[in-house]
Amino acid sequence: MEHRKQKKETDERLDATDIASYYVGSELKTGRERIVKMSAEVVDSNPYSRLMALQRMGIVKEYEQIRQKSVAVVGVGGVGSVTADMLTRCGIGRLLLFDYDKVELANMNRLFFTPDQAGMSKVEAAAKTLNFINPDVAITTHNYNITTVDNFNSFLHAIRMGGVADGTSVDLVLSCVDNFEARMAINTACNELKIIWFESGVSENAVSGHIQFIRPGETACFGCAPPLVVAENIDEKTLKREGVCAASLPTTMGIVAGMLVQNTLKYLLHFGTVSDYLGYNALIDFFPRMSLKPNPTCDDRYCLQRQQEYIAKPPSERDAGSARESEFEAPLHEDNLYGIELISADDGLPLSFSDKITTKYNEISDGLKLAYDAPIAEGDAPQLSTEDDVSLDQLMAQMSGMCKTSEKD
């Protein structure tokens, strides 16, 4: 009883002290004091010296600007918890955490959470750990499901007013959720508020993942290009009751979180090129990159509004992003001081790679459906013969077969 009273009194003092602390069992863990200004001084007691070294290396102009940035992390699971951890260690100004799940022992195969936190809400457990790691970061928690009507309005208000400065919105929203409905809720909110965001995900087999940078009106939103295969009336809790769960590897989670935070830093601190879409296939160590244009027939009305606003911008403003990317891609040091040359290159991809990653209709499991018809793969499309000795009748027959195939599609 005395221990609980002491713990309560300590918790009440956390907001009034400059030292982060919390209990692990009966042991009080005490962290460092808050640091008012980041310093580049190279001493063992400076947690920011290696981050500030990015300025000396010419990568970032002013790293301390990160303290003026606010980021919302939606979903504090395998990817989201590691993402929040990395941003906290980088010294982000403000961090908003959204999740309504609890920590379970089943989460221990992933990173960040510890067994003693089982039963706690994920946002509460994460906030205590993150405050201990870096008390300079202002962390707010939101323990609710953003897909319900009332909670969606709370989510809108939180990211609209969640900036470092009073009355401003967050600078970036990071989607680290694991279901279609939550992604669509984030998509709708960011389209409505014109907030730039990242979508991220890991495959069910745990050996591939991706991140997507979404700028409303300029690039495809999540509704512009929905997944080919989506679940029908199935959620994670239903699958758990039936003894089924998705695979999970801490390695894949960490890699996707790393890609997400790396591109977040590049966007917030204006260095390098931010990838519109970056994938990861662990089986062959393949990292595809691409850009997705918005769909002019998107079902999201806010997306259509943002597209019209983007089209109405002067060409100079629309081309500004491309100009910045070209500037970022310029080498920091033009001289080849060490005489390094590329002798040969091999992408190492098998010829049948596209066939391996293409979803086949007959491989779709029960409870899943096709959101739209998949395009015919180039190898499956009917081809005209290129032989010189083919008769006119044979060519006509081939063309007739191609027309019938097109009509079916």
Image (cartoon, rainbow, N blue to C red):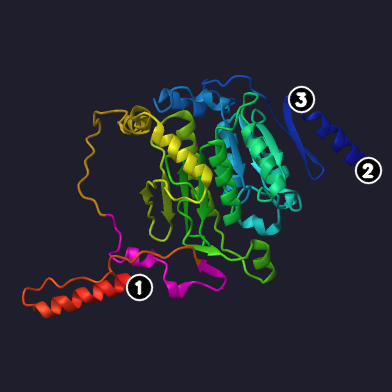
Q: Earlier in the sequence, mark 2 or mark 3?
A: 2
Q: CA distance from mark 3 to mark 1?
A: 70 Å
- The residue mark sitting in front, 1 or 2, is 1
Point 64% across, 67% down: residue:
239
Point 45% across, 53% down: residue:
225
How busy is the neighbourhood of tag 2: few (under 14 within 10 Å), some, or many (20 plus)?
few
> Is 69 above or below relative to 386?
above
Q: Is residue 359 magenta?
A: yes
- The residue mark sitting in front, 3 or 1, is 1
Residue type beneath disc 3: Thr
Q: Position of residue 45 (x, y in %)?
A: 60, 25
Q: Earlier in the sequence, mark 1 or mark 2?
A: 2
Quickly name the residue at label 1: 408
Quarter of the picture containing the C terminus is: bottom left
Element on which disc 3 rests? loop
Point 12% across, 71% down: residue:
386
The answer to whether any part of residue 179 appears in the image is no
Point 52% across, 23% down: residue:
42
Quickly name the residue at label 2: 1
Q: CA distance from mark 2 to mark 3?
A: 24 Å
Q: CA distance from mark 1 to mark 2?
A: 74 Å
Q: Earlier in the sequence, mark 3 or mark 1?
A: 3
Q: Position of residue 52 (x, y in %)?
A: 49, 25
Residue type beneath disc 1: Lys
For residue 372, side relative to residue 147 (left or right): left
- Mark seen at residue 17: 3
Please report the bounds of the magenta region as a residue range: 347-369
Query: Residue 70 occupies which quadrant of the picture?
Result: top right
Q: Residue furthest left?
A: 389
For residue 368, side relative to residue 126 (left or right): left
Element on which disc 1 rests? helix
